[in-house]
């Protein structure tokens, strides 16, 4: 994900530090907004509506002191029910309005404007994900990101990976295997299918092997990472590389900003949406962002499908070796060309997903209490994701997207779009049940 | 000739980037492990997370 910088090279750290700090600061500021507007004000809106309803029906409002007492007592009762085992779900602490807000509601018979603002922002999904991505993109393409900050903004993107690993604290193996198995079928049909179709279509259209190999890997599997893995195999030219990366980024960017709204428009269940973006969006950062944008349940499903998908990188490299190296050589009578399968798998397998599986195993062994699981899987994941999304947003440059072009762009873009539409229809037909991750 | 040299250069760059990604994966595993350990030890808890957020209702 961090193409262009090497996070593990200590000599590069001074070069990365300024941009990375800016991303952390940007993420921190936006998280303040998210906690206050999307969290507190949105809850405030719901509470204000609850308080307002009886007042509008003509009932006598409680005094502020009685209102607070009533909220606390109802929480106490709910807790007693939970402790007695009558309720499965632990009740969350009640949202209690401040005195001035309560009195405003009682006097004006209206909801304070700040709560309505929180509700609208929530309704239009202007969460921290949207603000970081749209805000980052806006900054990058208007005032620009100074050269001194650029390596650091690239280095911020891999912060999504620890988030993916830690999110494993939310899963049980039964869910991972169930969703993973269906994810496997989806990946074989749509992702490998797109890769193979692009390779064959490219050959028929007499497009360059190097370019189509990159495009197949990138559009089919894992965006930039897969394109980088395949580039040496297919002898890609620098121009091909930038065309392919441009196409991948353009599709990914359009998908990132449109899929959450398409999902809302079609009223897609979180799990269905998660499975869809996991199959259809081309790289991990954009996919995780689009899923998080839609909701936590969508992220849980998308994460499993994504892990299955990126586990396919070695297979795509094997396909590229076969299709662009071994097959033409054999056709030319050279039978000495062979594939060292184990070597390719060993070299190209994305190691970090092992961390996710370790986390799932620890959760299965009841290593995490519900509080620790929530802290890891929600709060800490959110911080890592926010830093990563700041890096993603600040790296969406329209100039890079303009590098997409030519026949390869048409083939890649059409294939990616058709893949996304077919995957959506297929997943909608299956329904949400197979994709739901039950939080335990 | 120049095209070939450029292709060779890109090939090397792609290999280098991929091996950097591999090292990055190990670094990411270490970071995640440290965070989980800190949470399990109670060094990072709800209070620490709550302190990050200054804007509160």
Image (spheres, coloured by chain):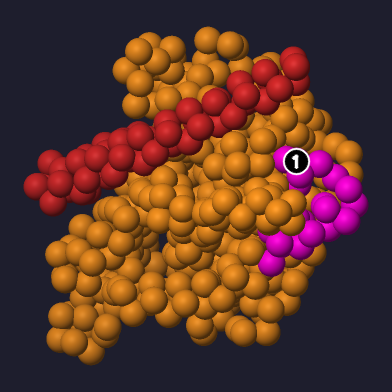
Chain colours: A orange, B red
> x, y (%) of residue A336?
57, 51
- In percent of width and height, residue A419 lies at 74, 64
Q: Residue at x 67, y 18 (%)?
A: B5
Q: Give the number of callouts.
A: 1
Q: Main secondary structure of the magenta part?
A: helix
Q: Nearer the viewer, residue A313 or B26?
A: A313
Q: Residue at x 9, y 47 (%)?
A: B41
Find residue B34 and report its image quarter.
top left
Q: Give the extent of the magenta segment.
A: A193-212
Q: Secondary structure at mark 1?
A: helix
Q: Residue at x 83, y 53 (%)?
A: A203
Q: Left or right? Give the position of A11 relative to B34.
A: right
Relative vertical location of residue A320 with respect to residue A3 in this rendering, above or below = below
Q: Position of residue A329 (x, y in %)?
A: 68, 50
Q: Position of residue A58 (x, y in %)?
A: 56, 75
**Which residue, given by chain and number where applicable, does mark 1 sit on?**
A211
Using the image as rendered, state which of residue A303 and residue A236 is in the foreground: A236
Of all residues, the one furthest to the bottom in this rendering is A86
Left or right: A124, with A30 as reference point: right
Chain ID at mark 1: A
Looking at the rendered image, the quarter that the C terminus of chain A falls into is bottom left
């Amino acid at each position: 994900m961090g193409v262009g910088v090497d996070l593990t090279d200590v000599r590069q750290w001074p070069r990365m530090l300024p941009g990375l700090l800016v991303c952390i600061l940007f993420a921190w500021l936006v998280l303040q907004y998210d906690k206050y507007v999307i969290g507190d004000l949105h809850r405030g809106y719901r509470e204000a509506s609850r308080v307002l309803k009886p007042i509008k029906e003509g009932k006598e409002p409680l005094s502020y002191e009685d209102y607070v007492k009533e909220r606390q007592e109802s929480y106490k009762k709910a807790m007693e029910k939970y402790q007695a085992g009558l309720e499965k779900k632990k009740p969350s602490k009640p949202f209690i309005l401040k005195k001035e807000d309560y009195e405003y509601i009682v006097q004006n018979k209206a909801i304070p404007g700040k709560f309505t603002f929180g509700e609208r922002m929530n309704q239009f999904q202007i969460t921290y994900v949207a603000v970081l991505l749209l805000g980052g993109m806006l900054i990058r393409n208007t005032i620009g990101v100074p050269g001194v900050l650029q390596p650091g903004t690239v280095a911020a993107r891999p912060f999504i990976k620890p988030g993916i690993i830690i999110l494993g604290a939310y899963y049980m193996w039964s869910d991972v295997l169930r969703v993973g198995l269906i994810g496997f079928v989806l990946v074989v049909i749509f992702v490998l299918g797109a890769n193979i179709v692009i390779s064959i279509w490219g050959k028929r259209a007499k497009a360059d092997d190097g370019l189509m190999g990159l495009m197949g890997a990138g559009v089919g599997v894992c965006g930039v990472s897969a394109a980088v893995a395949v580039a040496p195999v297919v002898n890609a030219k620098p121009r091909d590389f930038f065309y392919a990366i441009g196409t991948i980024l353009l599709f990914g960017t359009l998908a990132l900003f449109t899929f959450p709204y398409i999902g809302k428009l079609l009223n897609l269940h979180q799990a269905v949406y998660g499975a869809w973006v996991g199959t259809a969006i081309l790289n991990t950062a954009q996919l995780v962002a689009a899923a998080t944008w839609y909701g936590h349940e969508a992220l849980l499903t998308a994460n499993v499908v994504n892990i299955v998908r990126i586990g396919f990188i070695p297979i795509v490299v094997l396909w590229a070796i076969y299709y662009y190296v071994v097959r033409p050589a054999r056709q030319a009578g050279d039978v000495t060309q062979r594939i060292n399968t184990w070597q390719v798998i060993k070299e190209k397998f994305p190691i970090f997903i092992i961390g996710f599986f370790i986390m799932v195993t620890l959760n299965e062994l009841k290593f995490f209490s519900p509080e620790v699981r929530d802290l890891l899987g929600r709060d800490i994941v959110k911080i890592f994701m926010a830093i990563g999304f700041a890096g993603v947003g600040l790296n969406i440059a329209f100039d890079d997207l303009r590098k997409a072009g030519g026949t390869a762009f048409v083939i890649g873009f059409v294939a990616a779009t058709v893949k996304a539409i077919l995957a959506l229809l297929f997943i909608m037909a299956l329904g949400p049940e197979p994709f739901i991750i039950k939080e335990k | 000739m120049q095209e070939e040299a450029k292709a060779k250069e890109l090939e090397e760059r792609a290999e280098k980037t991929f091996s950097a990604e591999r090292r990055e994966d190990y670094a990411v595993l270490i970071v995640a492990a440290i965070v989980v350990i800190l949470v399990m030890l109670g060094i990072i808890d709800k209070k620490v997370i709550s302190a990050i957020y200054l804007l509160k209702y």
